[in-house]
Image (cartoon, rainbow, N blue to C red):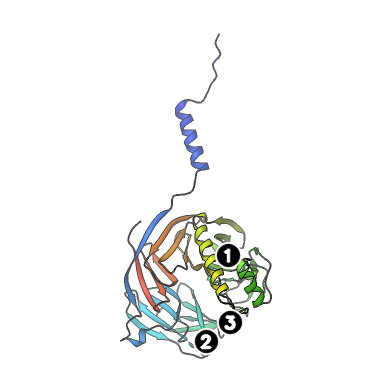
Amino acid sequence: MISRSRGIPIPYALLFLICLSACAGGPDPIGEVTWTEVDRFAADEADTMSLLAGPVDIVVHGDLVWVIDVRSDDLALFTRAGEFVRRIGRSGEGPGEFSRPALFLTWPDTVGVWDFGSNRIQRFGPRGEYGSMFRPGTAEQPAGGAGLDPKGCLYLARGGFQFDHLVQVLAPDGSPRSSFGDLPAPRVDLLDMVAIKTDIVEGRMHSWFANSIVTTVTDRAVWVAFQAEPVVRRYSLSGDLEHERVLEPCETLWENRIAAWRQRNAEDDTPYAFYGLQIVEDIDPLDDGGVLLTFEDPDRFNAVRLSAEGRIAEEWSGPAGEWHDVAVVDENTLYAIDRATSSIAKLVRSGG
C-alpha cells in the first residue's frame, strides 16, 4: 500500500505564502508629492502694515492665518486668501503686549502666544481680542516647541538641558506635573562653549546636540524628532514609549547636513561661537494621527509625512526658499514662512 502524505493544497499554500510575505514585508511604499506656490503675502512693500520683520511661527485658526513677528513684538493676522486683517500687540509687558513672542499654542476657541521675554502665555479670541494670561511653572522656555493635549496639559521640549528627560508636562494651570523620555546622551547643566565647539570640529556629537529635539502633540500621542540622527519617537500622553523609528530613507539627508554643519563651524575659528544643529525645522500634527517633518533645505521645500505608526508615507517637495515653519490646513493646502523674504507662501498639492 502506498503511503500518501497530507500536504497543504496548492491554493492554500499560495495564500499562506502571500500572507507570510505581506507580514514579513519590505518597506512600505513611499508616495512622492509636489507642492506648488499659488500665493504669497506680507510681501507688498506698499502695504507697510502687512510687512513682517521677523516671522517665527504660523498657525491657521478658524478662517485666519496668524503669524508671530518676533522683531516687531506683535502678531499679524491675515485671511486665508492673504488679505491683511490687523496687527496685535506692541513691545511691553502689559496685557496684549510682547517681549520676544515665539510660539503659538491653540485651543478650540482661542490662540495662545508664549512670550519668551516675559515668560507668560497670553490667550486671544478668534478675531484677535485679548482674553487672559497665565505664567507657566517653569523658567526655561521650550526651544524645541510645545503642544497641548485635549485636556489642556502642556508638553514642552526640554532636550536634557538642566533636565533629566526629553519632555516636561505642565498642568492646564501651568504647574509642573511630570516628565518623560530617556536621554540618548548625558544631561547638560552648563554650556561650555569652547568644549562644544571643540567637539563639533573634531567630529564628536556633544550632548547638547545629541539630546536636541523638536516635539508636537496629537490627540493621542506626543512625538519627538531628534536633530542629531534620523530618529522619531512616539509616546502616549502619559509618557509611555510606544515606538521608535529610524527614518532610513532620510539617513543621507542627515549625513550631508551634519557634514555641512561641521564644516561651517570649522570655518569659523572663534572658539566660543558655534552654529546650532537644525535639520528638522518644524514638526506639525496631522489629522490622521501622524506628523509632518519639515527639513532645513536651501534648495527646495523638503518634508516627509509620517503615518501614525511613524513610517514615512509621503515625501513632499516644492519651491526653493528658507522654509522655517509650516501650518497644514488639510491634505491639499499649507502655509509656510519663508525667512529669506520674511513672507508667507500658500502651497497646494499638485501631484501624488
Residue 88 visible somewhere in the drawing: yes
User: x%, y% of residue 132?
Assistant: 51, 83
User: Which quarter shows the C terminus?
Assistant: bottom left
Label 3 close to label 2 by CB (< 8 Å) = no
Q: Residues within 10 Å of mark 1 (few under 14, many from 20)?
A: many
Residue kind at label 2, given as amino acid type: Ser
Does residue 107 lie above or below 46 as drawn? Answer: above
Q: Which mark is residue 135?
A: 3
Comparing 181 with 297, the one in front is 297
Residue 161 visible somewhere in the drawing: no
Residue 325, quarter of the rendered image = bottom left
Nearer to us of marks 1 and 3 is: 1
Residue kind at label 1, given as amino acid type: Ala
User: x%, y% of residue 334?
Assistant: 38, 68
Circle 1: element type: loop
Q: CA distance from mark 3 to mark 2?
A: 14 Å
Nearer to us of marks 1 and 2 is: 1
Comparing 24 with 194, the one in front is 194
Q: Residue at x 40, y 79 (%)?
A: 342
Residue indicated by mark 1: 228
**Tag count:** 3
Circle 3: element type: loop
User: Which quarter shows the N terminus?
Assistant: top right
Circle 2: element type: loop
Label 1 close to label 3 by CB (< 8 Å) = no
Residue indicated by mark 2: 99
Sequence-wise first label, 1 or 3: 3
- 178 left or right of 33? right
User: x%, y% of residue 343?
Assistant: 38, 78
Q: Residue at x 40, y 85 (%)?
A: 87
Does residue 204 lie above or below 99 as drawn? Answer: above
